[in-house]
Image (cartoon, rainbow, N blue to C red):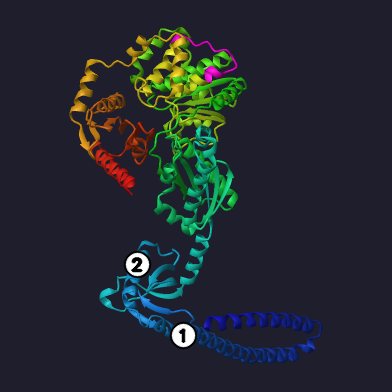
Amino acid sequence: MQNSNRKVFDTLMSRTKIYLGIILILFVIICIENPIMIIPSILIYIGLIIYSYFANNKRRSEISETLQDLTLTVDTTAKTSLINSPFPLIILQTDGNVIWRSSKFNTEFANIDINSYIDDLCIDIKNEIEKKEDNANKDIERKIEIDKNTYLIKGRYVHIKNKDKDKKNKKEYMIILYFIDDTENIKLQKEYNDSKTCVGMLVVDNYEEIVQRIESEDKPQIIAEIDKCIYDWANLTNGVLIKQERDRYIYFFEQRYLDTVKEDKFSVLDKIKEIDTKENIQFTLSIAISNEGETDKDKYKSVQNAMDIVLGRGGDQAVIRENEIYKFFGGRAQEVEKRTKVKARTVAHALENLIKESKKVMIMGHTNPDMDCIGASMGVYRLAKSLNTNAYIIKTDNTSTLQAFNESIEKEEEYEDTMINKEVALENIDEDTLLIIVDTHKKSYVESPEILEKANKVVIIDHHRRSADYIENATLIFQEVYASSSAELVTELLQYATTKIELKTIEAESLYAGIMMDTKNFTFKTGVRTFEAAAYLRKCGVDIIRVKKWFQSNLESYNKIADIVKEAELVNGSIGISTYEEENAKDANVICAKAADELLTIGDITASFVIGQLEDKVCISGRSIGDINVQVILEKLGGGGHITLAGAQVEGKTIEETKQELIKKINEYFAEIEN
């Protein structure tokens, strides 16, 4: 306050000095013009100085009294506001010493042991202060639960000098904290979130095909049973279910019931299978639910994308899209082979047009390519060449799994410039390049994610169940999980192309080998269309003996496989698990896959897993005869595939750690089935 008074007085004095200076100049001028005025001027000027001095002193005194009254008023108001604060208020030190509590604080927490909360709060705040720099923000904000109420705590701290000589070097702080009861706001926020809309979509997977096989007089009753089953399930959430088409339903419900849906684990998936069709066939259902999006339109788009994933995984399952994460339920039944080839014809024509519009085509598979991958690539290459478009297959440096095939293709001059590495491909890809990805749809599993990122036009041809890590914004997708292999899908496209395709022998053989590998010699996942594709390739001149030689193992590899099978152990009574302990084995994934196949030939084993070290990752090969879904199990470890054939790669763990994690996921799988 003294500083304020001094500033005011200094301002007044500075103005007075200016005026006195001007008057002095005027008197000097007058005295020069008229010397008689010298003495009167001096007297008058001295009088002015004396008057100014007393006038300024009086004014200074008045200003000082006014400012002092104002200060007292402000201090009194501040103290009154502090004491009568509408919020509980406390002033304390970081050592836990309470300096003052407001009456509101004492009333608010009269029946609560508040001291324990205060002690914990002091420790927490002190730890935070010690981490901050001296010039950091000194505001404090916390939320804590006190006796079923949630309080927003706001305040500020200041450093205080410690009068205790023994603690002079120890920093202490004084804190003033306001306790604002935020319980109602939180309840309102929760109510607001709970009242948000979740959008769902339900699709009867095989509706058209089954209905066609049902007798006309039974159709109305069975359709009514399907509707009743779905509507009864929707009533669990008091939701609104709208039948959009004969096999498609749109579902709206409040988010408060989302946990109810999760706890129910989509029991409707099993109930719809119990509907008696008298033809010994089952209806299956696909369900997608999403709560992501600002508007209902955004949520509807999100649920459409989620449904694409469910259908891409073979149907008969449900998915919830929440917080940018997909959570899957069900999906333990075999895929049903589709009998219509309309889609294959449509995709074939669309693919032809895309190839014609492009100056070049690049074909890329997945990392550690197998025979199905290279076979599909060879088939797409021939389609592009038949349309007079330059085509290239992006090869991998690690081709130990295709050694026998590579030896055969090296004898063919045409393919010398066809196989390019990813570095060359990355340099030559441009806006007019069509990138065709085969045997995978996962962004993280393609041979070169950089090439995928650079490509403007992307086509996907795959037979695996769709995962959450799928490639988005593809121009054309041909993903059919009923198919035995990508080679089968490509063979169908070649059959339905409008351009005449003349497959070379090695191309037909590579496609045949791809089908043969993924079906385990036409044993697993083999449908009518699989044999139709094989028959078409056989007509193109496939030498089956030559193909079989590509899969032959040498004696060393066979002995490794025998040792793996020998060391296998049973889990849950029917699952065989073994490990391949050899380090730095470049063919670990091949050995593990063959060992897993071999384990299935043992009578008591219905599913098998073999774990091995592949460079800096641990690879897992899973196989099943169909009773157990190895894809669902390995999906929990970041993998994927099919019900009968799946794989995964795990980083940052040893083989033994991965084995224990796998056993844990297997137990979770069986627990989910039982529940």
Q: Main secondary structure of the magenta part?
A: loop
Range drawn in magenta: 493-505
Residue 171 seen: no
Residue 660 in picture, x, y percent from top left: 24, 41
Q: Which residue is mark 2?
A: 124
- The quarter of the displayed image where residue 161 is located: bottom left
Three-letter residue code for mark 1: Ile
Q: Are marks 2 and 1 in contact (CB under 8 Å)?
A: no
Secondary element type, mark 1: helix
State the residue position of label 1: 83
Secondary structure, mark 2, is helix
Residue 186 vertical position relative to residue 520 in the rendered view, above or below: below
Image quadrant assignment for residue 603:
top left
* Residue 282 among those drawn in magenta: no
- Seen as rendered, the residue at the extreme right is 33
Q: What residue do we see at 28% from left, 78% from top?
A: 164
Q: Check disc 2 and give the amino acid type.
A: Asp
Horizontal arrangement in the rendering, residue 550 relative to residue 436 (left or right): left
Other residues around mark 2 within 10 Å, as few (<14) / some (14–19) / many (≥20): few
Image point 72% across, 82% down: which residue?
24
From what the image shows, is residue 213 above or below residue 139? Answer: above
